[in-house]
Amino acid sequence: STLRYDTLIEDCKQVLASLIPREKEIRDMDGRWHMVRLMPYRTAANVIDGVVMTIMNVDRIKQAEAALRESEDLYHTLFEEVDEGCCIVEVLVDEHEKPVDYRFLEVNPAFQEQTGLAGAKGKRMRELAPDRREDWLDACGRVALTGEAVRFTHHAAQMNRWFEVYAARISLPEQRRVAVLFSDVTRRRRAEKGEADALVSRDLFQGIVQTIRLPLLVLGTDLRVVSVNEAFYRTFAERPDQTEGRLVYELGNGQWDMPALRQLLEDILPGREVMTDFRVEHEFPDIGRRTFLLNARRLRREGDEPGLILLALEDVTGGEA
């Protein structure tokens, strides 16, 4: 025989002594698996007269079992290690097949981290959080009863967190088991809201800038023009394509490259938040000699956004401020 059955004789003796059949999985010389069954041989005269041995090839069954174990190990590894919160729930219904609660069958470590629900396995949601909104129950109930997977965004008001949720049925309809995968997207939602708020603030700021009647420039910390208002364009006969993004000293073919303005922007303002009534006299090619009072303010912005400089010009030519 090619079977690797080193204890065959001993096993046969035990079967004869106990009259109890014996089964054992044995591999052959080629590594294939076989199920060997040893049974007492009873003659027609009801006399035990040896042992009957049957052999069945179970190699495919063993391969399938090994593949299943590998799959289950992989599943549990993924389930335990993923950053997303995962849980498997059983949806509970009343006598009218209406979902009324759900029980947690499995949860992964990220589940507790993201929801704050400790010891959830085996418990019902209403036990853990009686005041929780019905969103999740409604979603899991629909999935369990219809078999249609869903995606939705959920705001957990008590924790002030946002979650993206995916739920799908993973059982027979009557078992009503649903796998739920969710991730905390609170930071992304807040960033998106921050961007939206920034756009609103930017639009509001630009609206204010444009309604001011005095010529006004908004400069970056590198002294390049971020924006100017219509009053500036009208007063100095400038165009947007000749102004925005350019160094302030380059405007109007260099007409703004004046020592007094450099002193204000490079020497005085960096050490102060505000500078008012800084007097400048200059000969401008298009509008002649003018006297301006410059009012400057440094504007700080949140986060890593670079600051701005707001520069307003009041024409006091021919008069005193």
Image (cartoon, rainbow, N blue to C red):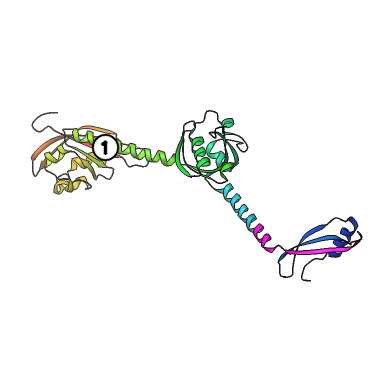
Quick check: 21 left or right of 151? right
The residue depicted at 38 percent of the width and 40 percent of the height is 192
How many neighbours does mark 1 have within 10 angstroms: few (below 14), some (14-19), or many (20 or more)? Answer: few
To which quarter of the image does residue 173 belong? top right
Magenta span includes 219: no
Nearest to the observer: residue 99 or residue 168: 99
Q: State the extent of the magenta-drawn residues as a range.
A: 43-65
Is residue 268 visible in the rendered image? The answer is no
The residue under label 1 is 203
Q: Does the magenta stretch include residue 61?
A: yes
* Residue 195 makes an appearance in the image: yes
Residue situated in front as seen by the camera: 106 or 231: 106
- Give, as a three-letter code, the residue at label 1: Asp
* x, y percent for residue 86: 55, 43
- Across and down, in percent, residue 126 comes to 57, 31
Q: Where is residue 268 in the image (x, y as percent from the top left)?
A: 26, 37
Residue 41 falls in which quadrant of the image? bottom right
Residue 22, given in percent of the width and then of the height, sits at 82, 58
- Quadrant into which the C terminus falls: top left
